[in-house]
Amino acid sequence: MQFGVFSVGDVTMDPTTGRTPSEGERIEAMTRIALKAEEVGLDVFATGEHHNPPFVPSAPTTHLAYIAARTQKLLLSTSTTLITTTDPVRIAEDYAFLQHLSQGRVDLMMGRGNTGPVYPWFGKDIRQGVPLAIENYHLLRRLWREEVVDWQGRFRTPLQGFTSTPRPLDGTPPFVWHGSIRSTEIAEQAAYYGDGFFHNNIFWNMEHTAQMVALYRRRFEHYRHGAADQAIVGLGGQVFMAPTEAEAKRAFRPYFDNAPVYGHGPSLEEFTRATPLTVGTPEMVIERTLGFADAVGDYQRQLFLIDHAGLPVETVLEQMEILGTEVVPVLRAEFERRRPAHVPSDPPTHGSLVAAGPDAPHHLVTPAQSASERAAARVGA
Amino acid sequence: MSRRIVVLTAGLSQPSSTRLLADQLADAVTTQVSARGESLEVDVIELRELASDLATTMTTGGMPTPAVRRALDLVSAADGLVAVTPVFAASYSGLFKMFVDVLDPDALTGMPVVIAATAGTARHQLVLDHALRPLFSYLRAVVLPTGVFAATEDFGGGQSVELSSRVARAAAELAAQVVAETGAVGGFVQDVAPARRRRSGTDLDTDVTDFETLLADLGQ
């Protein structure tokens, strides 16, 4: 199972000091967090993508390439890549390039983005969010899997005899996740292609997250990629730890109370009850996180959000130290103990996808169609 | 078959004239439904009791608290609605609108609704038709023709008879809708467009469109 951290990349005032970091300081903090992830034995660092203040990460592949050059094993990912407003040709090229630079240590998570004005800034319409995600991603799959692409669609200028360069590393496109909090079409999309499904698991109650994952699993099986419990699931989560619960709450409360999104709303206690947020001891975090698998089934990737709401980078690095030394080793052992043998432990990686060979379903644009054709052929024979 | 209505009341004081009007409407609807040979259950939602839950729901990106969730499910499962608000600053109250704002866009689709309001003076009575009626029309509710407005003076003296008859008229209109058989005889009417389903939105709609259809719609 993979563990890691994901960052939104917000530039937020520290409410305890009144100080707001500069953009440069925030970028540097994100880099230090990524390097720390490798140092403390985490597997994944994922960066958000935004094109509006107060967020810095507008150029994810630039940043991830820099991190790749300074790490050996860390897997680089996104949370999320804006499949709606980014030209799929740019995504195909940028991330294939990043694959080459990082020796395959890259996967991506597609997301739509929910900031209205970003769409018109990139010539798009937010009301077309789902159709954009569908058309753009389908083109992206073709660009990575077909040498020469002739294409015509609704949202982008047609392509005639186009080859996306460089070709994916070892002719093997990166693994893709689809992230969505509430849109069932996106769970359906992930299931259709046999891709991973990620739920951010921060803003909604666990029962809701479980419904989204259950839908994805049911449709993954429907499209014949495997049994429902073999579908590739990732979850987010949000924690803050200290040796005692009281100390954790005391330290985190000013950040919670002023946080973007839910600050000045529910109390820390209410929000902790209603959502997966855990503020307390490492033991409490372990217990709560293990409970996620009771809700959504045994899953493959757990990412924690730990660097938002103006928390100073030193505090974040301390939190990562606790995660890496006290929490994740226990979670690894316990999650493996409960996982049935036929349920994959890890999501596909570049290594496993190359090992599966060029005839594996991953290399097909629409593996679900091919699976149903194979099934029909078996019935016919 | 027993019918069920929900009464939404947004009064703030206790007792409130808004609740008083709400109770009169509820009783009148019960009488009118009984007169049509059916029984009626009435659930009253005092929005004041949801005030901080509604604020929490608003500040967490729309995640309903358990109490808000129960109210949303109750409303969308009802056969009819009576909505009563005090008039604040020439419109429905903020608390009343907060509840309406957390409703799913299809929470009241096709729902028969009686609109009612209270105020200190009769000069506010057009709030019914200038604020409440368009609000519920937007939500695709069936807003009944008779709205009920009660100023303080309507609760006593010569005006009170008129209020009672207005309450009875609105209740009769709602009762007729609540006991009416819905839908056409199967096979005899071809819907021009498939009807929108009413839903509280508190649970995921897992009835997904097959992905190949979504792709085909885009010509891919």
Image: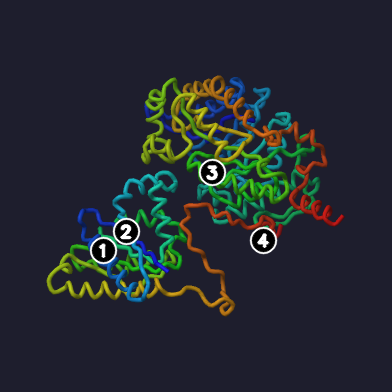
Q: Is residue B13 above or below residue A315?
A: below
Residue A51 quadrant: top right
> Which residue is situated farthest in the left direction here?
B157
The CA distance from mark 2 to mark 1 is 9 Å
Q: Which residue is mark 2?
A: B44
Give the chain of mark 4. Answer: B
Q: Is residue A320 left or right of residue B176?
A: right
Host chain of mark 3: A
Asked if marks 3 and 2 touch (Cβ < 8 Å), the reply is no
Q: Position of residue A43 (x, y in %)?
A: 63, 27
Residue type for callout 3: Thr
Disc 1 and disc 3 on one polypeptide chain: no
Q: Give a yes or no on whether discs 4 and 2 share a subunit.
A: yes
Front of the two marks 1 and 4: 1
Q: Is residue A272 left or right of residue A160?
A: left
- Label pair 2/1, CB-CB below 8 angstroms: yes
Q: Looking at the picture, tell me which residue is in the foreground, B25 or B27.
A: B27
Q: Amino acid at mark 2?
A: Val
Q: Residue B59 in the image: x percent, y percent?
A: 40, 44
Which residue does the numbered mark 4 point to in the structure image? B217
Which of the image's four quarters has the C terminus of chain A? Answer: bottom right
Q: Quadrant of the N terminus of chain A?
A: top right
Residue at the (68%, 36%) spot, across then down: A343
The residue that label 3 is drawn on is A209
Q: Are marks 3 and 4 on the same chain?
A: no
Q: Residue at x 55, y 47 (%)?
A: A211
Location of residue A211 with respect to A311 vertically, above or below: below
Report, in whole angstroms, how far the alpha carbon at label 3 lies from the one at label 4. Answer: 28 Å
Q: Do dots 3 and 2 share one subunit?
A: no
Look at the picture and state if B8 lies above or below A13.
Answer: below
